[in-house]
Amino acid sequence: MTERAIDLKKGKKVLIAPSILSADPLSIGDSIRALDGEDDWIHVDIMDGHFVPNLSYGPMIVKALRRGFRDKFLDVHLMVEPAEDFIDMFIAAGPDILTVQVEAARHIHRALGAIRASGARPGVCIDPGTSMEMIEPVLHMVDLVLVMTINPGFGGQKFLPETLLKIKSLVRAREVRSLDFLIEADGGVNPQTAKDLSLSGCDVLVAGSAIFEARDPASAARAIRSGADVKWSA
Ligand code: DX5
Ligand code: ZN
């Protein structure tokens, strides 16, 4: 892995990215503060009721998070189609990473190039039913590959174990091509699936319901981190 990627991971085995989709919409700021620093990134899900059968937030929420949490790393996941039409408005809101679904972009190189040119980090996301070949042509352009481990649209769904194969293929492709993107998993993450994901080579774990629906979100995030903190021999 190159210095750029190592720098992003800050020496941690995995990064934890709580998804505010499962936080109480009346008090998202308080929910983030209650994580007590257990969050490495804050994951923000943008849904359009078209690419996915659900609606969530627009750029205002990203802007408000940027204003309220200057030092947080904002990991924004666009589930909107066509992705290209929404890039400028989300870039203006100040994300650190802006990730587009490969299935929702008309011209994926153009979409990722526009994000990079804006100064933000580009990410590409792939659904469980989409083959790896779809993202192979752009792996050299991204800082992050977001692997959906559920079908996107809702929190609280069950992890699809077949997605672990895709993560392992990405680890191999990164090595063979000497690339330096991070691999992030999204959907159905809990302490047990965190272990499987970490053993498969995942760098960043998104977790919504397992953290924000827990009585103590900070210790739930800690439990996911220790689930992921396994050795190959474990
Ligand atoms: C779903 C979103 C996820 C969601 C995950 O489309 O992309 O980020 O918040 O929720 P959990 O962790 O509950 O599966
Ligand atoms: Zn997401």
Image: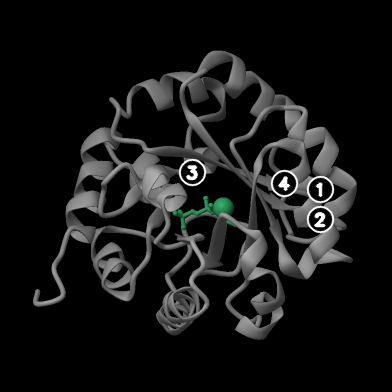
Circle 4: element type: helix
Within 8 Å: ligand 2 and the Cβ of disc 4? no
The first of marks 2 and 4 along the sequence is 2
The first of marks 3 and 2 along the sequence is 3
Q: Residue at x 80, y 65 (%)?
A: 108
The first of marks 3 and 1 along the sequence is 3
Residue under label 3, please give it.
19
- Mark 3 and mark 1: Cα distance apart in space: 25 Å
Q: Position of residue 95 (x, y in %)?
A: 63, 34
Q: Is residue 94 left or right of residue 150?
A: right
Residue 57: name its quadrant: top right
- Mark 2 and mark 1: Cα distance apart in space: 5 Å
- The answer to whether the residues at label 2 and label 1 have Cβ atoms under 8 Å apart is yes
Q: Nearer the viewer, residue 55 or 107?
A: 107
Q: Residue at x 17, y 53 (%)?
A: 226
Three-letter residue code for mark 1:
Ala
Q: Is residue 59 left or right of residue 220?
A: right
Residue under label 1, please give it.
114
Q: Residues within 10 Å of mark 2 (few under 14, many from 20)?
A: many
- The answer to whether the residues at label 2 and label 4 have Cβ atoms under 8 Å apart is no
The first of marks 3 and 4 along the sequence is 3
Three-letter residue code for mark 3:
Ser
Q: Is residue 81 left or right of residue 99?
A: right
Within 8 Å: ligand 1 and the Cβ of disc 3? yes
Circle 2: element type: helix
Residue under label 2, please give it.
111
The quadrant of the picture occupied by the C terminus is bottom left
Three-letter residue code for mark 4:
Arg
